Image (cartoon, helix red, strand yellow):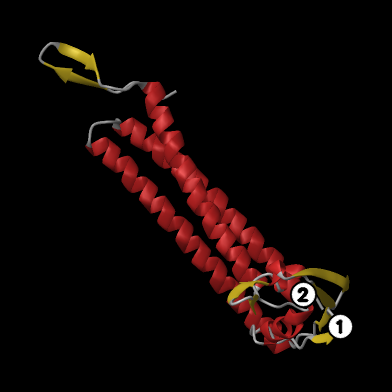
Amino acid sequence: MLDAVVESDKAGQRARPGNGRETVSDLNALLDDLTRRMDGALESLRRDFAGLRSGRASPALLEPVRVEAYGGEVPLTQVGSIAVPEARMITVQVWDRVLVGAVERAIRDAGLGLNPASDGQLIRVPIPQLTEERRHELAKAAARYAEGAKIAARGVRRDGMDKAKAFEKKGDISQDDVKTWSDAIQKLTDQYVKKIDDMLADKDREIKQV
């Protein structure tokens, strides 16, 4: 537990409002907020990676696709079920027959380089083999997305450090507490940067898989 913060007055030493337990509570609340925001950066990276087509079929590839349906635009997953019956084949079972054409168009126009074909309410989406040049482009794009996620995580860290310094400036925590808070924030950031690196390594292996 962090030491209670104290200050001097004319009568000598007296405790500030709040004690060590409250200081720890403030730190935990801050870390919870930073964790939530860094989780958001990871989720954004997952969506970005899902949009990078590798040579392997995956339901995640079509999850970002949005379909014009019922007067609006909805996620593909709300109008059909996605399956992977073969290593290079994705299927979409469209629940409403009138939406088959809209789903086909949405997949074709999503910029994924896919050419769907319907058979009744079942849409088959073959995954073409990637060229070496295309694999290189995808790997570079994945690296850019990962770097963007790291920048976002470090921005969250900076906000956390600024809040710790603001607490100190107001006299709510001591310099020793600032060091404790800063170390905890840096440790959290390092954990998320490693998660990003691990996600990038997995995506890179997927892209290079023949």
Amino acid type of the residue tagged 1 in the rendering: Gly
Residue density around tag 2, few if under 14, some if 14–19, many if 20 or more, within 10 Å: few
- Could you tell me residue 16's position as x and y percent? 25, 21
Task: Please count the marks in the image.
Answer: 2
Quadrant where the image shows the C terminus: bottom right
- Could you tell me residue 164's position as x and y percent? 33, 41
Quadrant where the image shows the N terminus: top left
Nearer the observer: mark 2 or 1; the answer is: 2
Q: Which mark is residue 59?
A: none
Residue found 49% across the figure and 41% down from its top: 32
- Could you tell me residue 50's position as x and y percent? 66, 70
| Residue at the extreme right | 86
The residue that mark 1 highlights is 120
Which of these two is toward me, 86 or 95?
A: 95
Residue found 69% across the figure and 69% down from its top: 63
- Could you tell me residue 34's position as x and y percent? 46, 47
Amino acid type of the residue tagged 2 in the rendering: Asp
Q: How far is disc 2 from disc 1 in space, using C-alphas? A: 11 Å
The residue that mark 2 highlights is 96
Which of these two is toward me, 140 or 39?
A: 39
Residue found 40% across the figure and 41% down from its top: 182
For numbered disc 2, what is the local secondary structure? Answer: loop
Asked if the residue at tag 1 contacts the one at tag 2, i.e. Cβ–Cβ closer than 8 Å, the answer is no
Q: Is residue 78 above or below residue 8?
A: below
Q: Is residue 14 above or below residue 121?
A: above
Q: Is residue 117 above or below residue 22?
A: below
Q: Within the image, what quadrant is residue 80 found in?
A: bottom right
